[in-house]
Image (spheres, rainbow, N blue to C red):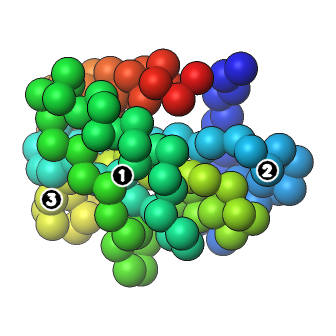
Amino acid sequence: NLGVLVTSGEELGLAGARVWAQTVRPRSVILNCDTIDDAGGWRLMYTGPRPRQIAAATEIVAPSLAAELRVSRMIPGILADSMAFADRGIEAITLSRGTISTLARIHTRRDNSMALSGRGVADASAALAALTRNLS
C-alpha cells in the first residue's frame, strides 16, 4: 500500500505531520521530500535510530540512479516532517538536495522556482519512486 501525504504547519513545529503521525501504523515507512535544489549532494536524513529498511533500499537503488544517495543524520537546526514520525518510533527519512547556498535561500524572497531548471525535482521523483518500489 502506498499513501501520499501533503502536510501543512511545518514552520509551526511540524504541526500537520505530528497530527497525522498519531494515526500511522507502527510498521509504516515514511519517505519525506523537502528542499530539492538542482545542485548539491543528495541526503536521506533521519533522526533517532538509523532507518535500517530505508538504508538497505538506498544501497540497492542508488547505483541504478547514478546518484550518490547518502543516509545521514539530520543537519542540526533543520526541521523536516520526517522528524514527527521518527519521534513516534516510525522509520522515516527526508530526501534533500542542496548546497550551503540552498540553505541561505530557503524562506527568503529568493526561494522560488526562477533559479531552478527542475532537474533536481525530476531526479528526486525517480529516487522516491525507486525507493518505494524496493520497499513495497
Mark 2 closeness class: few <14, some 14–19, many ≥20 residues within 10 Å? few
Measured Cα–Cα span from mark 1 to mark 3: 14 Å
What's under tag 1, amino acid-wise? Leu
Residue in the foreground of this view, choosing between 15 and 54: 54
Would residue 20 be visible to someone looking at this image? no
Would residue 39 be visible to someone looking at this image? yes
Q: Which residue is mark 3?
A: 99
Element type at marker 1? strand
Quadrant location, the N terminus:
top right
What's under tag 2, amino acid-wise? Pro
**Which labelled disc corresponds to residue 26?**
2
Q: Residue at x 15, y 59 (%)?
A: 99
Q: Earlier in the sequence, mark 1 or mark 2?
A: 2
Q: Position of residue 17 (x, y in %)?
A: 71, 54
Residue in the foreground of this view, choosing between 12 and 130: 130
Q: Position of residue 68 (x, y in %)?
A: 15, 43
Q: Which residue is mark 1?
A: 44
Q: Residue at x 30, y 28 (%)?
A: 61
Q: Earlier in the sequence, mark 3 or mark 2?
A: 2
